[in-house]
Amino acid sequence: MQVTVTFSGDSEDDGFNGSTTVVRNNIYDLYGLAQAFSDAARAGGYTYVEDVAFESDDGSMTFGYGGG
């Protein structure tokens, strides 16, 4: 699977006029998907994001590689 996340900025809102796109290929599991989203969040300006997690039906959490 390939994941593509694009952030678009308008200089009126935040002083940045342009876009940032993060593409991750070969996502095979929730660990990789969480890592792709945390990388994208940081690239989009959320530099304080350490990791992203998904909660399953049973309440267990799946973090990106190296997180949690």
Image (cartoon, helix red, strand yellow):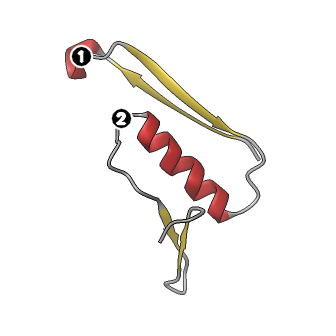
| Residue at x 59% of width, y 48% of height | 36
Judge left or right: residue 2 versus residue 30: right
* Image location of residue 58, percent across then percent down: 54, 87
Q: Position of residue 29 (x, y in %)?
A: 71, 63
In this view of the protein, which residue sits in the foreground, 67 or 6? 67
Q: Residue 42, located in which quarter of the rendered image? A: top left
Tell me which amino acid carries mark 1: Gly
Q: In terms of sequence position, does the residue under pointer 2 or pointer 1 come before the other?
A: 1
Q: Which residue is mark 2?
A: 45
SS for tag 2? loop
> How many labels were placed on the picture?
2
Q: Examine the rendered structure and indicate whether residue 32 appears above or below residue 17.
A: below
Counting from the top left corner in percent of width and height, residue 31 is at: 63, 63
Q: Is residue 47 left or right of residue 33?
A: left
**Above or below, comparing residue 16 to residue 24 in the picture:** above
Q: Nearer the viewer, residue 57 or 9?
A: 9
Residue 52 is marked as none
Residue at image point 74% right, 41% down: 25
Crowding near pointer 2: few (<14 within 10 Å), some, many (20+)? Answer: few
Residue 14: percent from the left, percent from the top?
Answer: 23, 22
Residue that mark 1 sits on: 15
Question: Mark 1 Cα within 10 Å, few/some/many (few <14, many 20+)?
Answer: few
**Dot 2 amino acid type:** Gly
Residue occupying the point 54% across, 81% down: 57
What SS does tag 1 mark?
loop
45 left or right of 65 in image:
left
Determine the residue located farthest toward the bottom in the rendered image. Answer: 58
Q: State left or right for residue 66 relative to residue 7.
A: right
Q: In the rendered image of this protein, does residue 19 appear above or below residue 2?
A: above
Residue at 41%, 56% (x, y): give it.
50
